[in-house]
Image (spheres, rainbow, N blue to C red):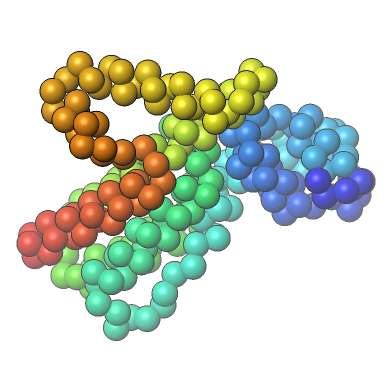
Amino acid sequence: MLGDVPRETLTKDQIITAAIELLDADGADGLSMRKLGQHLGSAATAVYWHVPNKDDLLALAGEHVWSEIPRSRAVDTDWRAAATELATAMYAMLTEHPWVLPAVGTHFLYGPNMAAWQEYGYGIIERAGFTGTDQDWALSALFTFVFGSVLGEATDATWRSQARRRGEDPDRALADELARAKDVARQFPRLQARLAAGADLDNPDARRTAFDYGLQALLDGLQARL
């Protein structure tokens, strides 16, 4: 909580920062203007003075998190190294803020910060040697891969926030769902074989390993197309 903040001194940056803290903790479903006012130590009416509604607040928060990602400005960097850095930075931001991915499906989270990342990505793809519409497809493939790779973290975060709102222990609720999923998977021979071999793709370390593997495979494919 940021303390007792009157309307006259409350700023939009303070509101966005507090909203991101709530979103990280409880997801988009757990965000409300009333809870935000409590988190700020202020009345909800003071928040409305700066941001008209929850949808606008979510859009502002979703746009802001893109500014958290550092990016190299070295123009002579190998394009694959730069693309790896770009994708890894996006992955880190989206796993830190797992509410962004589901919010993209319901809100238009676009502004200068995200546009700056697209511009930077186009520079990398152009440096690789792609031209015309191939630039669009190559960058789209990279962005789509990153977003898809964060699906597991986003699902986990959603389950945990829903369990907390139901008054349940989030770790237990998630463990129960994973156990049920494994029971389903045992009905299929290939999945059963991977489970018997001890394969576990549902933990953060395994997801990061899968991300690194998939990213380099994607870049291999893009390089082959050149």
Q: Relative to residue 94, is residue 194 drawn left or right?
A: left
The answer to whether one can see residue 168 in this image is: yes
Q: Residue furthest bottom?
A: 76
Q: Position of residue 111 (x, y in %)?
A: 51, 51
Q: Relative to residue 82, is residue 102 drawn left or right?
A: right
Identity of the residue drawn at 29% across and 83% down: 76
The number of discs equals 0
Identity of the residue drawn at 81% across and 36% down: 37
Q: Position of residue 207 (x, y in %)?
A: 34, 46
Name the residue nearer the viewer: 132 or 193. 193
Name the residue nearer the viewer: 64 or 96. 96
The answer to whether one can see residue 136 in this image is: no
Q: Is residue 91 above or below residue 128?
A: above
Q: Position of residue 61 (x, y in %)?
A: 61, 46
> Residue 34: which quarter of the image?
top right
Identity of the residue drawn at 82% across and 50% down: 2
Name the residue nearer the viewer: 136 or 22. 22
Q: Position of residue 100 (x, y in %)?
A: 50, 41
Image quadrant where one finds the C terminus: bottom left
Identity of the residue drawn at 16% across and 70% down: 129
Q: Relative to residue 105, is residue 142 drawn left or right?
A: left
